[in-house]
Amino acid sequence: MTAAAGVISLFLLYLAVMHRTRRITWLQRLADYAGEKLHRPGWVALPLVMFISTILTAFFGFIWDVSLHIGRGRDEGPLANPAHYFILVGLFFLFIAGALAIILPRDEKPGPAAIKITRTWYAPTGGLLIAGSGLYALIGFPLDDIWHRMFGQDVTLWGPTHLMLIGGAGLSLVGVLLLEHEGRVAMASTAVTTAATAGEPDGDTKADPAQAVDSRKRSIITWFMRSSAFGGLVIGLSVFQIEYDFGVEQFRLVFQPLLMTAAGAFALIAARLMVGRGSALFAVAFAAVIREITALIVGPVLGEPHSVFALYLGMAVVVEIMGLTTIVRRRLLFGAVTGVAVGTVGLYLESVWVDAVFLYPWPNSMWVEALATCIPAGLVVGLTAGLFAQALSGDGLPRPAVRRSIVVAMVLVLGGSVANGLMIDVPQGANATVSLIDAPREDGFRMVTATVSISSSDLVSDDPEWVSILSWQGAGDSLHGLVVDNLERTGPGEYRSTRAMPVDGTWKTFLRIQDGRTMAGAPIFMAADEGIGAEEVPATTEFTRELQYETKLLQRERSFDHPAWLFTAACLVVLACSLALIWSLSWGAARISLATPGNTATKGTKERSRV
């Protein structure tokens, strides 16, 4: 992969030199053609077309990769997983899309916020941010390999280097929105200059009917483009929840409403403020179509575990209703108030869908803690969305101290909410007694039902997040490597199966308990694994096993034989890189806003921005 990255880098350098010295013309013709179709400058249109295709490729590879790990376990090597090729190709072309936006501007300064590279070469800020996001994600691949060599295989989406991969790709949508805005500003400036040259300083002309039709067509195309971009942002920000979508969450359930609130508040509030009425609803519809197509391909078509996903429909409805009020004219206030509404009313509406389709519905006992984290998260994320919309509105930004305080508050509140979610208790001295009854074999595997008795009857309340049995990383034509059974409570500390579970072959089957901050598990059957020197844990007819730290069961291949400071230092390095990415995107939005004159788009060339 290092060799491949080197070849691609050399090709990009060659392409840049040949294009900028005018030794090739096909790249400019291709950009001009894309610009004509999308009604944007070529240095915006061509990267956008490439970005759309590449991000869909990477997203498909990502969902497929997660399902493969859930259904089959760890990879035999960095390139042994076929889904990794889709991810790599997608991330490489994500970086290339940003690089093209930097390379293409040749005889022009691409907007007032462009960054000077040489005396005659200016690059759009959005292009640099897209390339930076792609580079950040690509760096996650070699770091991931190093991470696994140091700490073993952490088969979880939330491994720090895994978060770099998905975070870079997801947040690149912010760079795309900034690049598209730079393109609109550049076109407006060109239109003003053209009108002034023609003796029409204010840009007003008596357009003929054909021009009016063309203007309406462009407005519609712009609305759909921007609404779709926010739909992509919904997808990008929701990928952090994928383990919950498959039903193999390895962290507390309270994280799910928090993540949904943060993603929905930012993407949908910004969409409503920046695009207009109906855009939030269109964004969630667009996201749902893409997610369902991907889920169908990975699940029924490829035969891997199937995922469900959050609709965000309830949150979109809340945002659209709030958009009918007068506070929509005050972006920061609208963001704050609507963010709180998203984290309360919108979250309740989403819980109806979660209870209907997800493997783990939200218990009533979780709502107090969920609201305690989601309300402040909705507030600060909504404020940040309002700030982002105001930055690109042409109305200017608040004072530096105000805008920096908003972004810092968002980081601190989300960080504190995450820290709260990571606080877990493992019961000491508690154990579970399990009795197994054989059921008819399925896909050739031994299947059993279970009755479970927990030694401390008061360890689990009447309304826990879950008491379940999980079987994963197996195989089979009908089981698809994943079976989850939420146990039925029969008495204090006593439970029984509602379906049969596999307990041989390569399956890993164990009891899971989460109640508030209590998280623990006990193995029922664990296949022998020569690769890590682990012996089989047999599924005998009856046994008593200690409840233990669940991560050691879920991430069996992970190594805990290392100094604590080394793991902490590695996590801090990844955190520093992530904060640098957030800072870069914030800096880019502020730069574009401050560099764009408030009167750049005159009333005759605003592209009907009040759609």
Image (cartoon, rainbow, N blue to C red):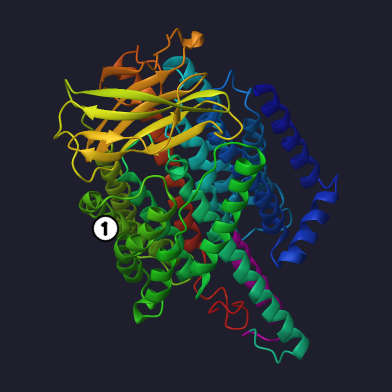
Kindly report the secondary structure that dominates the magenta region of the rendered protein. helix
Quadrant of the rendering where the C terminus is positioned: bottom right
* Quadrant position of residue 268: bottom left
Q: Position of residue 470 (x, y in %)?
A: 40, 32
Q: Which residues are magenta?
A: 180-202
Does residue 457 belong to the magenta stretch?
no
Left or right of 388 on screen, residue 341: left
Residue at 29% over, 24% down: 434
The residue beneath circle 1 is 375
Tell me residue 136's x, y (percent).
Answer: 52, 37
| Residue 214 position within the rendered picture, expressed as x and y whole percent measured from the top left | 73, 80
Q: What kind of element bears circle 1?
A: helix
Question: Considering depth in this image, is 577 or 461 the residue closer to the camera?
Answer: 461
Q: Quadrant of residue 496?
A: top left
Q: Is any atom of residue 275 visible in this view?
A: no
Q: Which residue is found at the position 59% from the left and 67% from the top?
A: 185
- State the image coordinates of residue 298 (x, y, percent, origin top left): 62, 41
Relative placement, left or right, of 219 versus 356 is: right
Q: Amino acid at mark 1?
A: Ile
